[in-house]
Every structure is written in structure tokens, then in C-alpha cells.
Amino acid sequence: MMDCTRLDAALQTWVDSDRLPGASYLVVKDGEVAASGCVGWADREAQVPLRPDHLFRIFSNTKLVTSLAALQLMEQGRLGADDPIGDHIPELSNLRVLRPGATSMDDTAPAREPVRVRHLLTHTAGMTYAFLQPDLPIAKAYMAAGVSDHRSDLPQMMRSLAGLPLLFEPGSAWNYSVSIDIVGRLVEVVSGLRLDDYFRRHIFEPLSMHDTFFVVPPEKQARLTAMYMGNLREPTRPGLRRVDHLPYVEAYRQPAARLNPGGGLVSTLGDFMTLVRTLLAGGAPLLRRETMPLVLENQLLPGQWIGCPGIPAVEGRGHSFAGSVTVQASIEDPTSAVGELQWGGLAGTKWSLSPRENLAVVLMTQRYMGSDLAFWPEFKGLVREGL
């Protein structure tokens, strides 16, 4: 085991400075737990200390589960990386693209090629998230169409997207987006199962992930952590307020019309580490070893890095079919290793795995819109120093 003193102290500083409510972590090196800990609170107001079994809203870490489901269907020959998505979801055939410099959502041209499954999995489909830059016309169009409205189901979401233009030609750029929500609908269409049923049968049960779900069962809701938010204009400023009502009232406690493939799961530190360790160990029983290059290796075009309007490009970071991949060392990202696969959620839940180091790290916290704060690179840097 590592000496966890420095790890705990670093996270405690974030808690004591009123920038994180609490944080828990697991580090696995060479197949063994090398470090673990919990600091701070699951519920500050009730003075409930954070425990390893607490439940977290993992938001965009849900994307890993959805992408793995699609890869399983690819292994079975039921879905192809180069399939036009309109072959499976006819509403999304014949999509149009905004012309360069367009000032109107009607200033479009037919896409030169269809959006394919690989474009969805790598966020190169030409779609977006309305919350990234809410004042842009495309964001307003997404909101007006109800693209992210939890009161509509996934089929309705597909119909909403069908009437909206792409930002760019499929495959030509990277833009973080709702594309994994479409992947979730593909999983439903191709498998014939609702997404929650597919996840349970083919991912959660094989791995004994008994604390991961879209809706927390009543008997487990006492373990759901409270959620907090800081200053959105100055995110590094101390000061948190409780926001359990986000992203909508009773989220994760009551069923909603939409199962959110890109951000709707709740999980625990242990459950999510089980998933990450499975990938680090070669993928079984979820995936064949020969499928793992699609999980671990960059699938973007040479020189194409993750980044979009409102999110600065990270030089050296590409994207596989499962998450961000560090392709080359970068001064902008000094605590990531070449070959490291990682991602994070909107409220600060983080994971990474590094095959070269045989290292897996999962960190959980609950600060809404806190994913880009420096606690994660700081933490990873201390982990590597302590190994």
C-alpha cells in the first residue's frame, strides 16, 4: 500500500477551503489496491462523513458504460463502426450541416457523408451540448427542440435531433456532444432491450456491480450523496451551496421518461473501479482482448485533438471509442501518462487507467460543474509520485 497521507491531505485542503464537499478514491496498481481513502462529507448539513459505499451521480462517466455496450454489439456483428446511423435510426438519415459562417439555422447544406457509429463514439459527428455555450444559436435551437429534456424519451430525442443541423462535416472536427445519447438509442434498437435492462444483463450483473443504476432503489437512497455547487463565474473561489434539485427535481430518485446514456447513472467508488479494473485487465468478461485497441487507442485523425468552442483544445489528447487518450506528452497536461485513458463527470467523478503502468484510479466527489477544477490533475500527480 502507498502512504495515503499526502493524498488525503491534498483532498482535505480542497474540503477545508470550501471548494469540494468531500472526496473518496481508489488506486489499483499491478492488480492490487495501492491506496484508498475518504475525506470530507457525504452530507455537510447533516454531518455525514463520506464512506466508500456512498452513491454518486457520475454524469458523463455513464458514457463509458454506453460505449462498452456498443462495442459488445460490434463484437457480435450486430453493429458496425462504419454503419451510417440512419441504417438503424431512420430519422437520423440525410442530416444537414451548417454552412461556414452561417447566421441562421436554415443556412445548411447536405452532409457530404452520413454520420457513422465511429463519429458518435469519438464525438466527431458534428453535434453539441447546449450547456457548453448556451448563448449560441445552435444551443438555443437544441434547447427549443427539447434535446436534453428528461421528460421526453430517447425515441423522441432522436426525432428532435433529426430537425437540427450538424456543426461540421462528420469526422472533420471534435466537439463534445450528445452523440453518446444516440449510441444509447442504437444499443436499444439493435439489442431489442431497454438501455437499463441491457446494462444490467450484459455489464452490471457480469461484474457484480450491484450499486449502479439510473434510478436509486428506495432502500439505497439514504446512501446518495448530497450535491453542491460553487461560483460558476469564478469556479476556484471558495464557497459551496447545496443543489440536490439539479439537474432536475427528484433526478435519480424517481424514474424519468428518458434513460440518459450520456450522463444518467449513479454508482459507487467500488462499482466503478470494478469496471475500470476490468478494462485494465484485458476486458473480460465484457469484451474480447482483440477489441481492446478500440477502447485504449486514439481513433481521431492525426493532429486532431479534443477541444471545442468554450473548451480549450488539449494538445496531445485524442479520443478512443471509450474516452480520452493521451497520445503524446504535453505541458498542458503534465500529470497524464502517454497511453492513459480517462474521463470525468459533470460533478467531478473521475477515472483513468494506464496500461503501461498497470494503474487504475477512480476519484469520486459531488460538485456540480466542478469537473475541470485542478483537484484531479493534482491528485494524479501525487499518485504517481507515491508509487
Image (tube, grey):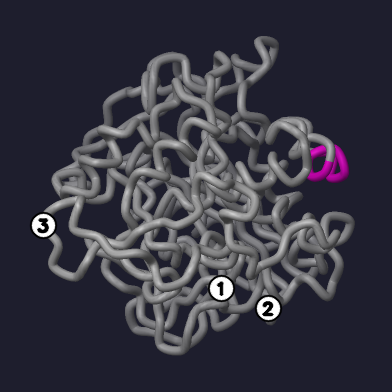
Q: Nearer the viewer, residue 177 or 12?
A: 177
Magenta stretch encompasses residue 206:
yes
Magenta stretch encompasses residue 316:
no
Q: Please report whichever mark, 3 or 2, sits nearer to the chain's N-terminal start.
A: 3
Residue 131 coordinates in the image, percent (x, y): 28, 43
User: The disc labelled 3 sits on which kind of residue?
Assistant: Thr
Residue 269 coordinates in the image, percent (x, y): 64, 42
Q: CA distance from mark 3 to mark 2?
A: 48 Å
Residue 213 coordinates in the image, percent (x, y): 67, 30
User: The disc labelled 2 sits on which kind of residue?
Assistant: Glu
Residue 51 coordinates in the image, percent (x, y): 61, 31
Q: Is residue 216 left or right of residue 190?
A: left
Q: Is residue 346 visible?
A: yes
Asked whether the beta carbons under mark 3 and mark 1 sit within 8 Å of each other, the answer is no
Numbered disc in front, either 2 or 1? 2
Q: Nearer the viewer, residue 234 or 135?
A: 135
Residue topped by disc 2: 357
Asked whether the beta carbons under mark 2 and mark 1 sit within 8 Å of each other, the answer is yes
- Mark 3: secondary structure: loop
Q: In the rendering, which numbered label is found on residue 103? A: 3
Tell how many labels.
Answer: 3
The magenta region covers: 202-208
Residue topped by disc 1: 384
User: The disc labelled 1 sits on which kind of residue?
Assistant: Arg
